[in-house]
Image (cartoon, rainbow, N blue to C red):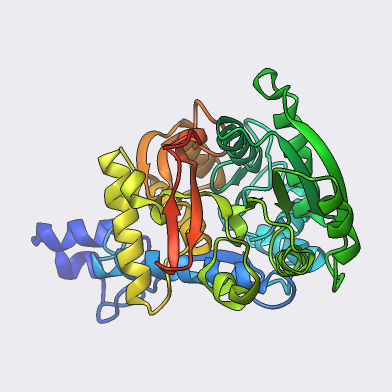
Amino acid sequence: MNLRRALRGCAAFIAVALMSSSVAGPARAADPYEIPVILSLTGLYAFIGKGSQVGLEGVEQVANAAGGVNGRQIKFVFQDDGSSPQTSLQLANALTAKGTPFILGPSSTATCSSVVPTVTNGPVVYCLTPGIHPAPGSWAFSANVSSDVTLVAGLRYLHQRGLKRIAILAATDASGQDQERGTDEALALPGNKDFTVVAREHFGPTDVSAAAQLTRIKAANPQALMLLCVGTPFGTGIHAVADSGIDVPVFTSNGNSTYAAMKQYAAFLPKELLFPDQPPLAIEAITDKGVRDQAVLFNKTVAGLGVKPDGIPATTWDPGWLLIGAIKRYGFSVTAAQAKDYLSTLRGYAGAMGRYDFRDVPQRGLNEQSVIITKWDTQKDWWVPVSKPGGAPS
């Protein structure tokens, strides 16, 4: 049966039909529009990948409950790279060969680093980690505030508290190296010249102990410790801190601000564990109403899925909505070039992570005003903000 002839004279139904990218048959709604996602659902970075999955499942639920996108349901299709950079690259190459306009993920610094250099003419790759630093104007984008910027905010907080003798303990994996480089760049800024690095130690991502490193750090008598690692190495490092008996504030990556990690390592968390965190974990410190509303929606949605709304799903929430925005703008035939243009020129978008301006902050959209230093509070069993946006103590 010819669909146009059957609907002739019924303008409302024709309008609906024209909104759809395809019609499988007169009695069946269009299949969901699929958005491919590469995550580390198993392996070393599984805790990141699984948290990232929850954030996108929340986006999917909210969007579809509101009628979908342009009247059509959406579906995030997850592929597991097993925390392997080689597998990430293989999955990305396969998706590129199929002509997908965009890919969400991968979800770790190591896996995303394998994909970004190969994307020279599309698709858009929206990495779900702050540890990637794509070149302005490139096809790669990075979620959250840059790891470099979070370290600037963290040092600002320590500096204004007078904690200027710091020690560094960094993992030797991609995340640890990125954070150590960012720390050194932040320390080189004019306002940080009076910091002193009294000790610098390293440990491998698969090491089971960092006791010897902490012995040397303790002997250097620091006022604060920068624990630069994410995931399993964080557990190794924080355990070594407790065993050493060192009693100073410990500053670590927001990639470790997960409720599961706080529960798993509860027996040996330091008295003062600090994070350069996202607005959803410090709603009371948010001054932008639009951002606050989105952060509240994120928290409510993820909690409704039976998951604590911590930092990892928060990182993926906004990228999911941003790609949906490109689909709304250009329709289901959106191209990689259109998605890239949409993101690159977007200004003023209020997300759960902050107010986005991709012209001012290319490939990322967020600046240091989206960083709020938090402290894990064992009594409240949650994070509490200890700074204003940007890292200045509150």
Instruction: Name the side, left or right, on which 255 lies relative to 389.
Output: right
All told, the count of numbered labels is 0
Q: Quadrant of the N terminus?
A: bottom left
Q: Is residue 254 above or below residue 40?
A: above
Q: Is residue 332 visible from the viewing direction of this image? A: no
Q: Can you name the residue that lies furthest to the left here?
A: 9
Q: Is residue 280 visible from the viewing direction of this image? A: yes
The image quarter in which residue 45 lies: bottom right
Residue 278 image point, x, y percent: 47, 50
Instruction: Name the side, left or right, on which 181 lies relative to 60.
Output: right
Residue 163 image point, x, y percent: 64, 37
In this view of the protein, which residue sits in the foreground, 261 or 334?
Answer: 261
Residue visible at 63% across and 50% down in the picture: 249
Residue visible at 60% across and 44% down in the picture: 141
Q: Quadrant of the C terminus?
A: top left
Residue visible at 15% across and 66% down in the picture: 7
Instruction: Name the side, left or right, on which 184 lies relative to 325.
Output: right
Residue 306 image point, x, y percent: 38, 80
Residue visible at 74% across and 58% down in the picture: 246
Residue 283 image point, x, y percent: 34, 51
Q: Is residue 270 above or below residue 150?
A: below
